[in-house]
Image (cartoon, rainbow, N blue to C red):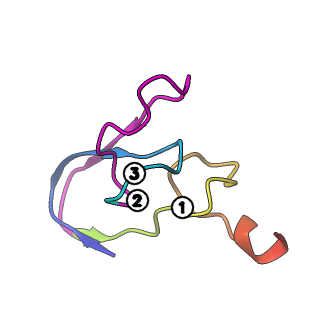
Amino acid sequence: MQLDSGEYWWCSCGRSADQPFCDGAHKGTGFSPEKVEIKETRKVALCNCKHSSQGPVCDGAHSSL
């Protein structure tokens, strides 16, 4: 996805209705969102399966689920 420069919060719990971004649905789950800082507008592959070994960055783990 194309993201403009700025600060984003990646959902780590999978409950957000605004995937892959946090909407606060993690409250009470023990999960916390991870901050993603984008310095300049660029394409970013954010993980939606929540199995990436690289946190918010997709590493292709979804292909083996």
- Which amino acid type is shown beneath numbered disc 2? Pro
Asked if the residues shown at circle 2 and circle 1 are in contact, with their CB atoms under 8 angstroms apart, the answer is yes
Quadrant assignment for the N terminus: bottom left
- The label on residue 16 is 3
Image location of residue 36, percent across then percent down: 34, 44
Which of 23 and 10 lies nearest the eye of the viewer? 23
Please tell me whether residue 29 belongs to the stretch shown in magenta: yes
Observer-side mark, 2 or 1, equals 2
The residue furthest right is 64
* Residues packed near mark 1 inside 10 Å, few (<14), some (14 to 19) or many (20 plus): many
Q: Residue 24 appears in which quarter of the rendering?
A: top left
* Residues packed near mark 2 inside 10 Å, few (<14), some (14 to 19) or many (20 plus): many
- Which amino acid type is shown beneath numbered disc 1? Cys
Disc 3 is placed on an element classified as loop
Disc 1 marks which residue?
47
Image location of residue 43, percent across then percent down: 33, 74
Q: Earlier in the sequence, mark 3 or mark 1?
A: 3
Please report the residue visible at 39 percent of the width from the left and 51 percent of the height from the top.
16
Asked if the residues shown at circle 3 and circle 2 are in contact, with their CB atoms under 8 angstroms apart, the answer is yes
Span highlighted in magenta in the image: 19-41
Which of 44 and 39 lies nearest the eye of the viewer? 44
Quadrant assignment for the C terminus: bottom right
Observer-side mark, 3 or 2, equals 3
Which of 57 and 29 lies nearest the eye of the viewer? 29
Please report the residue visible at 15 percent of the width from the left and 56 percent of the height from the top.
5
Observer-side mark, 3 or 1, equals 3
Image location of residue 56, percent across then percent down: 50, 51
Disc 2 marks which residue?
20
Please tell me whether residue 58 belongs to the stretch shown in magenta: no
